[in-house]
Image (spheres, grey):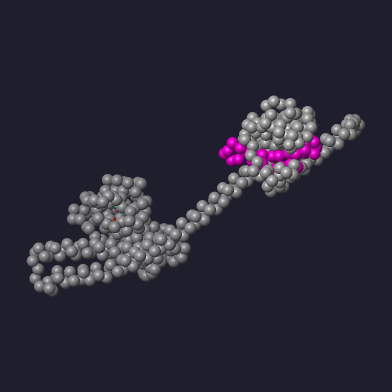
């Protein structure tokens, strides 16, 4: 292939190559330098001699302010160096300030020929410059500052020079932008790390507070239980006439004392059981039993049965059922559900049944009571949560029964689910494995 070589005058070729090399080096510095100031400094040092500038400087806009501070300086006369750190340039003032605020290249071929720059003439003769070219450091999102080159003699600034300076200033702007993005990222990252640590601290504090609360509840309920059982014991004795005959009025009052004390005792027992469960101090007694018998036991121990609400227990077909689990805990769960059904069903009926499907025993307690609104169906399984949270509640109770029951059911490898609609009634379903199999991780979850 025949290539025609165009001859470039030696001087131009030299300059062009030196410019190219300088730009290449500046781009390289841009890619590798850690701090933008290093790139600015390097660029000023490489470019100033190429364009014949005596000295040069880079100014960056202060965050959210109207002034720029010096970010790099090349070859400033020795006696001015001590003041460079304090140097500030107001946006819009002087060639650099104008270049930044108006986002354009400002050329001053001769400071002494420009009437608008009389302020500058004194500084110019003292520092020894005559011409200035200032370029904005501009990015897609805004202007970050300006770069200015100062020349000892008057300057015409040819197109090639301006082009080179443009490339350099664009490169500087990109560097400053990259640096501020990295800085922002660093700050966001540091904030994230800090808030993570704070969250971690709060989490640990919350865990500790919860542990203390459970410990306190366990101790308190234990302490309350002992005197209360003594009160109940003595009251039973008096009721039985061991301390002498009672009048009708005394009998009625004592009846109220016992029923209130029994309610209190149940509450304390629930609290004690729940905290024992949560502290992982519970032991299971696995035995083989008929789930139907457990259901009957639960009916016998459920409280609050009302006369005009009928209870149906669905009979089980032919062969008796068997399951291997903790009988007393199963009875406890069912008694809680039945007591709730009695309490929240002013009229209608309650149906309870047992069935076995796919290795699971399914107990169902269905009522035609007041029902539970959809949004409350999850929260009622939380401790101390009741649908009616008002001070003058219509139905008594502690809000612990379902929390306790669900934890027990999960501990035994099963769960409790609920179907309910307000004013139509509720169906609680307890599903437990026919044969209990220990599972440490599941137990930990049920206890947490
Ligand atoms: P308690 O009955 O002591 O308040 P539970 O944890 O047993 O506590 O029940 C929590 C709440 O769930 C009750 O206060 C009640 O609002 C609602 N609830 C439970 N069972 C029924 C039910 N069968 N019918 C309607 N609401 C119920």
Residue 293 image position (x, y, % from top left): 29, 65
Asked whether residue 154 is in view, the answer is: yes
Quadrant holding ligand 1?
Answer: bottom left
Of the pair 204 and 444, the residue shown nearer to us: 204
Residue drawn where x is 39% and y is 68% of the image: 281
Q: Is residue 28 above or below residue 442?
A: above
Residue drawn where x is 75% and y is 31% of the image: 131
For residue 317, what is the image quadrant? bottom left
Of the pair 91 and 284, the residue shown nearer to us: 91
Residue drawn where x is 88% and y is 31% of the image: 8
Residue drawn where x is 71% and y is 31% of the image: 121
The answer to if 133 sits in the magenta stretch is no
Picture quarter with the N terminus: top right
The residue at the far right in this view is: 2
The answer to if 64 sits in the magenta stretch is yes
Q: Is residue 228 left or right of residue 418?
A: left
């Amino acid at each position: 292939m025949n290539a025609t070589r165009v001859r470039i005058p030696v001087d131009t070729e030299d300059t062009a190559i030196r410019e190219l090399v300088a730009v290449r080096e500046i781009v390289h510095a841009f890619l590798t330098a850690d701090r933008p100031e290093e790139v600015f400094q390097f660029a000023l040092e490489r470019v100033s001699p190429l364009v014949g500038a005596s000295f040069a400087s880079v100014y960056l806009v202060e965050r959210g302010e109207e002034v720029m501070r010096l970010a790099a300086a090349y070859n400033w006369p020795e006696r001015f160096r001590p003041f460079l750190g304090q140097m500030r340039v107001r946006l819009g003032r002087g060639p650099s300030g104008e270049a930044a605020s108006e986002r354009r290249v400002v050329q001053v071929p001769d400071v002494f020929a420009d009437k608008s720059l009389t302020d500058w003439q004194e500084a110019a003769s003292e520092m020894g410059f005559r011409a200035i070219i200032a370029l904005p450091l501009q990015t897609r999102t805004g202007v970050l500052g300006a770069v200015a080159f100062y020349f000892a003699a008057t300057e015409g600034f040819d197109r090639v020079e301006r082009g080179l300076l443009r490339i350099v200033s664009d490169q500087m702007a990109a560097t400053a932008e990259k640096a501020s993005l990295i800085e922002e990222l660093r700050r966001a990252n540091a904030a994230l790390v800090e808030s993570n640590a704070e969250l971690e601290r709060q989490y640990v504090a919350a865990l500790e507070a919860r542990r203390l609360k459970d410990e306190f509840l366990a101790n308190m309920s234990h302490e309350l239980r002992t005197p209360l059982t003594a009160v109940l014991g003595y009251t039973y004795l008096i009721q039985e006439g061991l301390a002498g005959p009672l009048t009708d009025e005394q009998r009625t009052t004592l009846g109220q004392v016992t029923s209130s004390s029994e309610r209190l005792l149940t509450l304390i027992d629930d609290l004690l059981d729940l905290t024992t469960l949560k502290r992982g101090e519970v032991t299971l007694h696995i035995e083989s039993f008929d789930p139907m018998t457990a259901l009957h036991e639960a009916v016998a121990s459920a409280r609050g049965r009302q006369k005009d609400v009928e209870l149906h227990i669905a009979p089980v077909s032919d062969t008796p059922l068997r399951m291997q689990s903790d009988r007393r805990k199963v009875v406890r769960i069912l008694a809680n559900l039945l007591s709730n059904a009695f309490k929240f069903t002013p009229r209608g009926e309650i149906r309870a049944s047992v069935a076995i499907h796919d290795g699971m025993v399914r107990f169902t307690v269905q009522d035609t009571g007041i029902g539970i609104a959809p949004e409350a169906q999850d929260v009622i399984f939380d401790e101390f949560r009741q649908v009616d949270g008002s001070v003058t509640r219509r139905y008594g109770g502690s809000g612990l029964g379902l929390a306790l029951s669900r934890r027990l059911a999960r501990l035994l490898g099963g769960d409790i689910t609920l179907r309910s609609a307000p004013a139509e009634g509720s169906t609680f379903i307890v599903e437990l494995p026919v044969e209990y199999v220990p599972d440490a991780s599941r137990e930990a979850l049920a206890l947490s």
